[in-house]
Image (cartoon, rainbow, N blue to C red):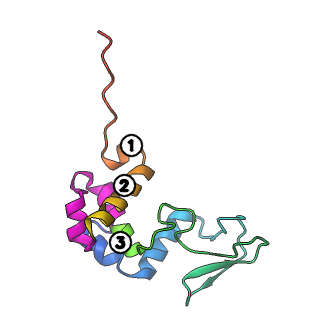
Amino acid sequence: METPRTLQQAVSYFSSFENCRAFLVSLRWPDGVVRCPYCRSDRVAWLASARLWKCYGTHPKAKFSLKTGTIFEGSPLGLDKWLPCVWLVVNEPRAATVPAVCRTLGVTPKTAWFLLHRIRLALPDNQAGLTPPAEKSTR
């Protein structure tokens, strides 16, 4: 399937971890070579049962996930919640409200606020439908 065109398609598409994985790998490593976020080595192996990569470089953190080094890192929420919310903020910024995210993703208002807040902070100002503040008149 190509990139989702509606929120319903995004929720359905990103409900599969393999789709999330393929999507994020193509964004993070456009050349197709997965690299360790700690040492930039390409000597990594996918551990399917753990859903992690193992780096064979010499550093303390040998394993990393899709979330490592992203706005998703440190969040217990799965990519099945994050990616549809990102889709909504980028494609329908005016519809990306706490109640809409609660209804669509089945999360609490606090979780919806957290998702929207992190996503909007990570995007360039105009990408999230935000307009810069008007400049003050000097008159």
Label 3 crowd bin: few (<14), some (14–19), many (20+), radius 10 Å: many
Per the image, is 114 magenta? no
Which residue in the structure is indicated by mark 3?
Answer: 81
In three-dimensional space, the C-alpha distance between marks 3 and 1, rounded to whole angstroms, equals 22 Å
Kindly identify which numbered label has been placed on residue 117: 2
**Given contact means CB atoms under 8 Å apart, are the residues at marks 1 and 2 in contact?**
no
Question: Which quadrant would residue 110 be assigned to in this image?
Answer: bottom left
Q: Estimate the x, y position of residue 95 in percent, counting from the top left.
A: 21, 56
Q: Residue at x 38, y 68 (%)?
A: 82
Inspect the image, locate mark 3, and give the three-letter code of the amino acid beneath it.
Lys
Question: In the figure, is residue 107 to the left or right of 2?
Answer: left
Label 1 crowd bin: few (<14), some (14–19), many (20+), radius 10 Å: few
Element type at marker 2? helix
Q: Earlier in the sequence, mark 1 or mark 2?
A: 2
Of all residues, the one furthest to the right in this rendering is 58
Please tell me how many numbered marks the rendered image carries. 3
**Given contact means CB atoms under 8 Å apart, are the residues at marks 3 and 2 in contact?**
no
Q: Estimate the x, y position of residue 13 in percent, counting from the top left.
A: 33, 76
- In this view, the residue in front, 132 or 19, is 132
Q: Estimate the x, y position of residue 109 in percent, counting from the top left.
A: 26, 64
Of all residues, the one furthest to the top in this rendering is 139
In three-dimensional space, the C-alpha distance between marks 3 and 2, rounded to whole angstroms, equals 14 Å
Q: Residue at x 42, y 78 (%)?
A: 19
Residues shaded magenta: 85-107
Q: Residue at x 34, y 49 (%)?
A: 128
- In this view, the residue in front, 24 or 130, is 130
In three-dimensional space, the C-alpha distance between marks 1 and 2, rounded to whole angstroms, equals 13 Å
- In this view, the residue in front, 69 or 1, is 69
Element type at marker 3? helix
Kindly identify which numbered label has been placed on residue 125: 1
The mark lying in front, picked from 3 and 2, is 2
- In this view, the residue in front, 115 or 54, is 115
